[in-house]
Amino acid sequence: MPALVLLGAQWGDEGKGKATDLLGGSVDYVVRYQGGNNAGHTVVVGDQKYALHLLPSGILSPGCTPVIGNGVVVDPAVLLSELSGLNERGVDTSKLMISGNAHLITPYHTTLDKVTERFLGKRKIGTTGRGIGPSYADKINRVGIRVQDIFDESILRQKVEAALDFKNQVLAKLYNRRAIAVDQVVEELLGYADELKGFVADTTLVLNSAIDEGKVVLFEGGQGTLLDVDHGTYPFVTSSNPTAGGACTGAGVGPTKINRVIGILKAYTTRVGAGPFPTELHDEDGEKLRTIGGERGVTTGRDRRCGWFDAVIARYATRVNGLTDFFLTKLDVLTGWEQIPVCVAYEIDGKRVEELPYSQTDFHHAKPVYEMLPGWTEDISKAKTFDDLPKNAQRYVQALEEMSGAPISAIGVGPGRDETIQINSFL
């Protein structure tokens, strides 16, 4: 039985929640392996819409065990609030498992995130201000607080004191902010211990044992390929690795155990936050995509920047993730255009470039080279098979598949759980 990675193949917000939910009934474990509550998934089940920020989408599938892996940074207040909200709506959250090695987002992380972003002014990255970057920075600097630390007051206090020795100097002397009291942070974090203790486990052991037993394990990435801290549009990226390799380090499972890697592609392109975006539209078409597609961030509430499909990015995602399949989402949003532009290459300093430039300077100056594809006007939301789609919609999908370098195995034709065309099984 397979172990699968499912990730965003653009800048995030591609519809990963729907893809994960589609597989949920056949999957034994769904694992978040990186990111924090800066990621968001919207899942529609019947007439119910669920906005998930930190929890794996599999929490909505009965019989599936949702797991927060060691590569995630956890804001305990946000986690408990999200669990409470689902419990109130009748969702069973008792099977959730959290790695004891996952790092915590503390009050001083969110404070530093916000004041640093304001300090940068025009040079700001466009972070969510939720403390994700500072928490990952502490992890790498070896002064982080892990989930397991809240069960040992002595260790917790030592670590908080060590972290605040330096951070309070920065807050007070650089940003003119009040120092944060060690006792206040320790007391707050200890207060989460009783509520979280029943969820904490050695998730690396659990997941490896599950795969060895033939269980189906789905690793769910947050954000997207172009937001990867190593392989994205640095510095306008997140602080972790949403790419496929991040699943191995963020969950403690070796690469030889991964069977398939599924990239989620929107039928056009969006991104939130600052940074280069070659196909971005600043006209009526961009506003139309934003309105019809409901392009507002699940977590941030910010309007997403919208543009035409970028095949250069799709090819790059195929390469750096080793994608075996694509799930194309929101095809229905493109209904009504007479012609649909697709970016097939870039023009940089007068030269045609068909692969993503590694140079930040070149990417900032990249201009899209478009190929026009015929559009369609028919409603496709009731389509159940590929042949049910209008001919021009079929040609659009086939063109994107050929340009992107991996087969499109599923197509989203609406927001609902059942509004999906399955071409090839992922399992």
Image (spheres, grey):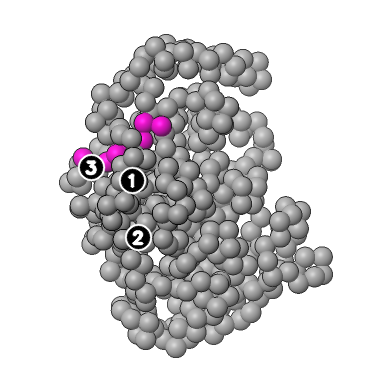
* Residue 58 % position (x, y): 30, 52
Local crowd size for mark 3, using a 10 Å CA cut-off: few (<14), some (14–19), many (≥20): some
Q: Is residue 278 left or right of residue 256?
A: right
The amino acid marked with disc number 3 is: Lys
Name the residue at 25% across, 37% down: 84
- Residue at the left extreme? 90
Q: Nearer the viewer, residue 263 or 202?
A: 202
The span from disc 3 to disc 2 (Cα, nearest Å) is 21 Å
Local crowd size for mark 1, using a 10 Å CA cut-off: few (<14), some (14–19), many (≥20): many
Q: Is residue 353 left or right of residue 328?
A: right
* Residue 212 % position (x, y): 31, 51
Magenta-span inclusion, residue 94: yes
Quarter containing the N terminus? bottom left
Mark drawn on residue 2 = 2
SS type, badge 2: loop
SS type, badge 3: loop
Q: Is residue 418 above or below residue 137?
A: below
Q: Is residue 140 left or right of residue 206?
A: right
* Residue 308 % position (x, y): 57, 69
Where residue 133 sits, quadrant-wise, is top right
User: What kind of secondary structure does the magenta stretch mostly adopt?
Assistant: loop
Name the residue at 23% across, 42% down: 95
Mark drawn on residue 207 = 1
Q: Is residue 182 above or below residue 72?
A: above
Quarter containing the C terminus? bottom left
The amino acid marked with disc number 1 is: Leu
Quick one: label 1 or label 3, which is nearer the N terminus? 3
- From which residue to which does the magenta span run? 93-101
The amino acid marked with disc number 2 is: Pro
